[in-house]
Image (cartoon, rainbow, N blue to C red):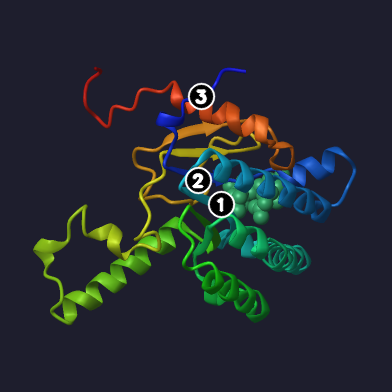
Amino acid sequence: MEQLNPEKLPRHVAIIMDGNGRWAKKKGLTRIIGHQNGVKSVREVVKASRELGIRWLTLYAFSEENWKRSKYEIRALMDLLKRYLKSELKEMLENDIRLSCIGQIDKLPIDVQTTLWHSIEKTAHNKEMTLTLALSYGGRQEIIWAIKNMLKDVEKGLLNIKQITEERFPEYLFTADAPDPDLLIRTSGEFRISNFLLWQIAYTELYITPALWPDFSKERYLEALLDYQKRERRFGSTSG
Ligand code: IPE
Ligand code: IPE
Ligand code: MG
């Protein structure tokens, strides 16, 4: 396999982890087993990102629209999330990984919120990598929330309309402290964004792989990163 250029790594990788259900169906297993196997890929990608020196990793774990799923599947996903957070805390502390989250966290079950905030607090001083979980997250909802908060600042006289610019607006998004993603990976072959990071991906490189999320291994991740390194990012300018 070709070698990755450590000088040209994406600073921020975002992933739409899709295909757990189809992976399970293909094997004659339940969707829940698919999600359980998806957690293995999460572990592998987090570990590989940290080893490579990627500074920001954002994982789409549960969308605002995923609340439309059955109560049974939602509870199973929430239980898996809680178990993941508990089992990975030690690993995050040992590897200098800061945990963060974006989304309407107050919609999550209380027990999950408690576990999540505990891990976020414990890892708050870690520096090498920020792992952000998008939970009950929707890009459109985030933009509306940001506009409302911005208008509150206008009402308070902290901001005037002239100051509403491309530079200031992102300060009101959930992702205020993070750079925009350089690379967005989507597994399971769907060519859509599904309401993920709408504002933030304006100039992000997209990589779509047919691999289903539980099959997304370290090797496949490296392939995605190699592909990214071959791209020419222009940001609207000309080549060279
Ligand atoms: C991704 O797998 C996990 C979540 C969206 C929570 P899916 O559950 O969407 O799997 P498919 O798309 O049905 O295969
Ligand atoms: C996107 O996957 C959301 C997550 C990966 C959490 P979905 O399976 O929910 O997306 P659609 O329904 O195929 O667009
Ligand atoms: Mg899906």
Residue 210 visible from this viewpoint: no
Q: What whole-number distance in Å separates the C-alpha atoms at marks 3 and 2? A: 15 Å
Number of the label disc, if any, that sits on residue 21? none
Q: What whole-number distance in Å separates the C-alpha atoms at marks 3 and 1? A: 19 Å
Q: Quadrant of the C terminus?
A: top left
Number of the label disc, if any, that sits on residue 14? 2
User: Which of the marked residues, 3 or 2, is nearer the chain's N terminus?
Assistant: 2
Residue at image mark 3: 227
Residue at image mark 1: 59
Q: Mark 1 belongs to which amino acid? A: Leu
Question: Compared to 141, does 110 lie above or below?
Answer: below
Q: Mark 3 belongs to which amino acid? A: Asp
* Residue 10 placement (x, y as % from top left): 43, 37
In the drawing, does residue 27 fall left or right of residue 139? right
State the residue at coordinates (15%, 71%).
159
User: Which of the marked residues, 1 or 2, is nearer the chain's N terminus?
Assistant: 2
User: Which of the marked residues, 3 or 1, is nearer the chain's N terminus?
Assistant: 1
State yes or no: discs 3 and 1 in contact (Cβ < 8 Å).
no
In the rendered image, the residue lying farthest to the right is 28
Question: Compared to 194, does 125 lie above or below?
Answer: below
Mark 3 element type: helix
State the residue at coordinates (17%, 75%).
154
* Residue 85 placement (x, y as % from top left): 67, 65
Mark 2 element type: strand
Q: What whole-number distance in Å separates the C-alpha atoms at marks 1 and 2? A: 6 Å
In the drawing, does residue 223 fall left or right of residue 74? left
Q: Quadrant of residue 148?
A: bottom left
Q: Mark 2 belongs to which amino acid? A: Ala
